[in-house]
Image: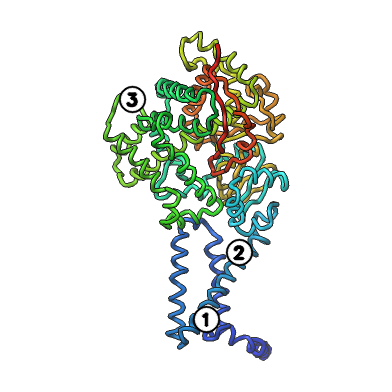
Amino acid sequence: MASNASTSSSFVKMAAPISPLLLDLHTPSGQALVALGAGVLSHLAYFKHGEHHNQGVYIIFFYLAAVPVLALSLWRFESLSLLASAVRTVALVVSYFAGLYGSMTLYRGLFHPLRKFDGPFLARFSNLYHSWLLAEKSDNYRLMTNLHNKYGEIVRTGPHNLSVNVPEAVQLVLGSKSKCYKSPWYDASLPLVNLHSTRNLKEHERRRKVFNKAFSPAALVAYEERITPLSQLWCDQVAKFAGQPINATAWFKYFAFDAMGELGFGESFHMIDRDDNRWLPDLLMAGMADIAQQQPIPWATPVLHRLPVTAGSRGAMKFISFVEAQVAKRKARGPNGKADILTNLLDTYEKSEKKDQDYQWLRGDTRLTIVGGSDTTATTLAYIFYYLCKYPEQVRKLRAEFEPLLAASGTEHLVVKDVAKAVHLNGVIHEALRMNPPIPSGYPRVTPPEGLEIAGKYIPGGTTVVIPLRTMGRSESCYERAEEFVPERWYSRPEMIKHKDAFAAFGIGPFACIGKALSLVEIRNLIVKILTRFDPAFAPGEDGSRFMEEAKDHFIIEVPSIKMVFKERKV
């Protein structure tokens, strides 16, 4: 008993000097210490766990509201002057955020499960570092290649983020058996949701069934009959330039957008033959640029969407109005005997018992129809003709292959049964996609709770993982002579492909692009039409170097203009 009393007495004497600091909440130092602890606790109990990107707006509003409430409380209950309460409030806010970010910094730098993975020093502390790098040049595909060259096959690109340039990882992360799920970035369009953005696998399966009929083999045959006149119109319009240079990038966009208008909404957007809607591709890409820059910081998207000046300056409302006008026109026109993608979407909506929920799906999927079915096709066409201009022998090989097929079938385009025979044409398309995938930096996924093992290394659960598709497509670990354009590797030189299952230009697994087959139909159709009628070449003074070096990564690749000439053949 005496010993215990003595010990207690000693403890009281030792604690006496600091007890006012700990217990007197009326002193500035005591309040600051509490604020510091509250910041640490906020990190350890809340921010460290789960996803909070969709609460970003509410968190900011909470902090903004807390500041005046705190100042008024100090003025009212501490009997401070307004100036003194304001100064005290600033000190407490600084203390709180010092605790919050100090705790985050220590955890992410020294104790985080990803601390053993190498990468840029600043990236381990905040995703703002990655976003800042994207803001400067929008060349994430090149940034990822440089990081992997410097740090190896697995690079830490953020506090909870890894870029994985390992061939086996493609199936593990994206494949049909993968337990990984889409990252928070896919919530960027909420409350709108579409087939591409939904993170719910069951919802995705349900919605994919709505699209399946529109992309059936029978539908594709019917679509090609309507694509051929557009290819013919494209050639007729380009022929009017009489071999003078044109911006090929823009003209491939006109074709792809008109094709999607025709097949998606039942009516061409008339970009090929008129200039009324030619503003649409640039507007769409400007919106994608915003979203892509925010990919490392998904909490920023819902915040910025609530700033009218930001949304308006990027023309988001103009794009929304355009899409909804196309839907209204299609509904007013009614069935016209021509199948289109929107027919299935409208039928599902009209039969739905959950009109409010499915209206958001309708709005989201109609926008996806334009975005997903146009720019990616146009970009792939631009890359293909870059290679055809650079390597004219490829044009001769293509003509030698498809001209006999056209003569035998008596058609102006490759019929379905002949597509498999056009091995070099398919090889050219695949090779262009390998070297320049439309989604160059890949699809961000989150590892399941039990984690994932890649290349003998354990990736903890809850880690955002991305496969940099362009980097992998040009990697010697996947392909021999990876930086060379060799279409034959896809049919007669299979030994040049070391990991065929690492090719994912259209995505793979349950979330693979449903429009892949349609996009390939459009690409084959226009290639055959152009090469039947024209000899493509770089315009004088053009070598394509700027086209290749200045492409921007907005999740979807945006290629700059490239000047080409299309001279009518002398047959």
Q: Cα distance, mark 3 to mark 1?
A: 70 Å
Q: Position of residue 442 (x, y in %)?
A: 58, 41
Q: Position of residue 99 (x, y in %)?
A: 59, 71
Per the image, label 2 sits on a secondary structure element best described as: helix
Q: Cα distance, mark 2 to mark 3?
A: 57 Å
Lower sequence index among marks 3 and 1: 1
Residue 425 in which image quadrant? top right
Per the image, label 1 sits on a secondary structure element best described as: helix
Q: Nearer the viewer, residue 149 or 526?
A: 526
- Residue displayed at 43% across by 40% down: 279
Lower sequence index among marks 2 and 1: 1
Q: Nearer the viewer, residue 343 or 321?
A: 321
Q: In the rendering, which numbered label is found on residue 104?
A: 2
Q: Nearer the viewer, residue 319 or 564?
A: 564
Residue position marked by numbered label 1 in the rendering: 88
On screen, residue 164 versus residue 326, left or right, reads: right
On screen, residue 469 versus residue 198, left or right, reads: right
Q: In the rendering, which numbered label is found on residue 338?
A: 3
> Residue lying furthest top in this view?
408
Q: Amino acid at mark 2?
A: Met
Q: Cα distance, mark 2 to mark 1?
A: 24 Å
Residue 435 drawn above or below residue 360: above
Mark 1: give few (<14), some (14-19) or many (20+) Cα within 10 Å.
many
Q: Amino acid at mark 1?
A: Arg
Q: Position of residue 155 (x, y in %)?
A: 67, 48
Q: Nearer the viewer, residue 286 or 352?
A: 286
- Residue displayed at 67% across by 23% down: 494
